[in-house]
Amino acid sequence: MPTALQAHQTAKITSQGTYDITVDKVRINTGKFKKIGVGYNNSSIPTILRFKEGEEVTINVTNNLKEYTSIHWHGLIVPFRMDGVPGISFNGIAPGETFTYRFPITQAGTYWFHSHSGFQEPDGAYGAIVIEPRGGERVRVNRDYVVQLADKHPHPGHRIMRNLKRMPDYYNRSQRTLQTLIKDARADGLQAALRERGMWGRMRMMPTDIEDLQGFAATINGLSTSQNWTGLFRAGEKVRLRFINASAMTYFDMRVPGLKMTVVQADGNDVKPVSVDELRIAVAETYDVIVQPRENKAYSIVAESVGRTGMVRGTLAPREGMAGAVPPMRPKPLLTMADMSGMMGGMGMEGHVMQNMTGMDHSNMAGMDHSNMGGMNQSGMAGMDHSGMGGMSATSSVDPTYVDGSGLIPRAYNGGKFLSYADLTAARPRYRYRKPSRTIEMRLTGNMERYIWSINDVKYSDSEPIVLNYGERVRIRFINETMMAHPMHLHGLWSLVDMGKGSRNPIKHTVNVNPAMTVEMDVEVDEPGQWAFHCHLSYHADAGMFRKVVVRGRPA
């Protein structure tokens, strides 16, 4: 059984602050299938880089592949030439060459790194970054573990993209059949069942369209449930779990049955501690939680995909050789007409896209229940101001607790508390609060029938850069006109999600935008250069939901 130490490979340190990383073809064994993929330091187990706040690091990356590669330091604020995005910050690393990254570590917390070349990241090119704060951690613990999630697929990334282009529901293994029609007809009557099928048909989608990609093997630190990643503890100790979602496409619902999780950090930034039973981690997000096992027994770390098509279980145990229980997968959610009600009535849905939503009031979409997808607390929600829920800036009088049968609401295990963006309060202000000087509207758009994803109906290849001015504060207003959640990642600049908390708004590098909802965030433009801005779902970014941001000017 791989222990926590065996499951974590660390880059070779040649001298103080100097690290060597190789990029290699590796064999991946998920326990369900074997494949050739990409990894670091000749291993399919994610490499962990451990830095200290205030140090200057030198990282030598040697490309042993037969194609160009790159490494992007996700969430790290670095000079833009060191950001690692081919075509924006540098040309990439040619086969057989070594590229040296040099940058100061100006922050602390949990982050990660990955290739920004082709589909190398979904093929396995990712790792973790842990930065020790100057003066030590604010919350002291006895044990500290990285828990890096991934969705490994038997198909290589280029083949997945080709199949999605040919048939967008190629990987949807939850198709509706004649048998489900018969079942619906028995429950609701044939006429009602046919009418519902007709509505879904006119929208060119299915109630099972929650995940683009199914058929993957979920892993923790490169290991499947049967391979059982294990972190050790002694009863009564405080254990820090650094959750990182390095998946290509999969959102996970995380829980440790039998233990409360105290969230102390989001996307590398300390937050005021909040106790929850479960949280949803979007692709590319990180959350640090503290758990305190009181008994000498095995506890399960459970990560279920939001569509309930994949799950992985790791273990916290007092000794090696133990394995936590593997709970049954909870029922697969389905989109319902309650979810879709705000999108009906002549909006011209085409392949998950609402064509005529500009100017609509997204705050009260005829009973839509998307307000809770992204980590909501289901308890005590009657009469709540939904402005803080799941990262939304809009308000609503709708009480999602009582919308019957929604497929998008995450429900905490055994009815406990589910984390929401509204629960996140910055432990310390990063910037003095000030009003933004202007607002940039970014409509998240697409066409599922053709598998095109875009911003403001324009693909990246046809777009102009977004120009920001050094020193200004801008507001980004996301309007999600699709029926997929999108984790939007802005390189090089912090994103402050508007939760109505002023300088205490949560500080993030990746912001989840739920289906058919509006999210607003402020950006303090304090890093000159050129930056990428994109959906972090690998195949959405490649299909066009991507922009280049140019920051003009620099410090006086």
Image: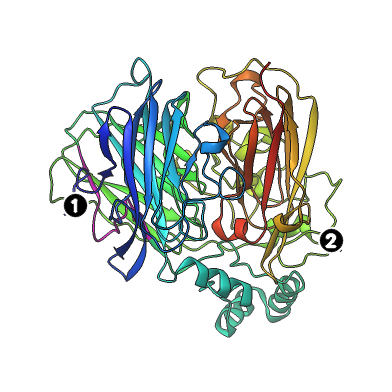
**Residue count near mark 1 (Cα–Cα under 10 Å), binned few <14, some 14–19, many ≥20:** some
**Residue count near mark 2 (Cα–Cα under 10 Å), binned few <14, some 14–19, many ≥20:** some
**Can residue 1 be seen here?**
yes
Q: Nearer the viewer, residue 129 or 235?
A: 129
Q: Secondary structure at mark 2?
A: loop
Left or right relative to 52: residue 175: right
Q: Which mark is residue 2?
A: 1
Please report the residue visible at 64 percent of the width from the left and 24 percent of the height from the top: 526
Q: Position of residue 106 (x, y in %)?
A: 47, 23
Alpha-carbon distance for marks 1 and 2?
Answer: 53 Å
Q: Position of residue 208 (x, y in %)?
A: 58, 67
Q: Nearer the viewer, residue 209 or 340?
A: 209
Q: Which residues are magenta?
A: 218-232
Q: Position of residue 356 (x, y in %)?
A: 85, 56
Please report the residue visible at 23 percent of the width from the left and 51 percent of the height from the top: 324
Please report the residue visible at 55 percent of the width from the left and 57 percent of the height from the top: 538
Q: Nearer the viewer, residue 96 or 153?
A: 96
User: Where on the picture, by quarter, is residue 60?
Assistant: top left
Q: Which mark is residue 347?
A: 2
What kind of residue is marked 2?
Met
